[in-house]
Image: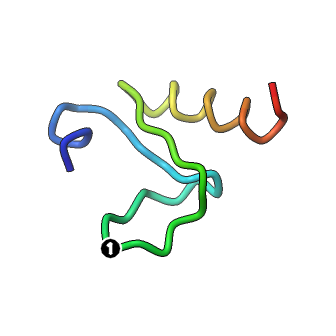
Amino acid sequence: LLVTEAGGAHATLSGAPFRIAGGNDLPFTAARDTATVQRILAALRTGG
């Protein structure tokens, strides 16, 4: 909620939004914008 309220973006490794209630694919990331989240997730998927 804090990331969203600040204008940021977040997602789990599968690309789904992080849910505070649980049941998330891990890892997850939060960043300043969706493009940055996508770059981080791509790096996590490829190990780079």
37 relative position to 4: left or right: right
Tell me which amino acid carries mark 1: Ala
Write the residue at 64% across / 38% down.
41
Write the residue at 37% across / 38% down.
9
Write the residue at 78% across / 41% down.
45
Residue 7 occupies quadrant: top left
Image location of residue 37, percent across then percent down: 52, 33
Q: Which residue is mark 1?
A: 21
Image location of residue 47, percent across then percent down: 82, 32
Residue 25 occupies quadrant: bottom right
- Tell me if residue 13 comes above or below residue 36 in the rendering: below
Q: Quadrant of the C terminus?
A: top right
Instruction: Rate crowding at label 1 as few (under 14), some (14 to 19) or many (20 or more) other CA atoms within 10 Å.
Output: few
48 relative position to 8: left or right: right
Which colour assignment does the render follow? rainbow
Image location of residue 38, percent across then percent down: 59, 34
- Tell me if residue 41 comes above or below residue 21 in the rendering: above
Write the residue at 37% across / 65% down.
19
Observer-nearest of 19 and 39 = 19
28 relative position to 2: left or right: right
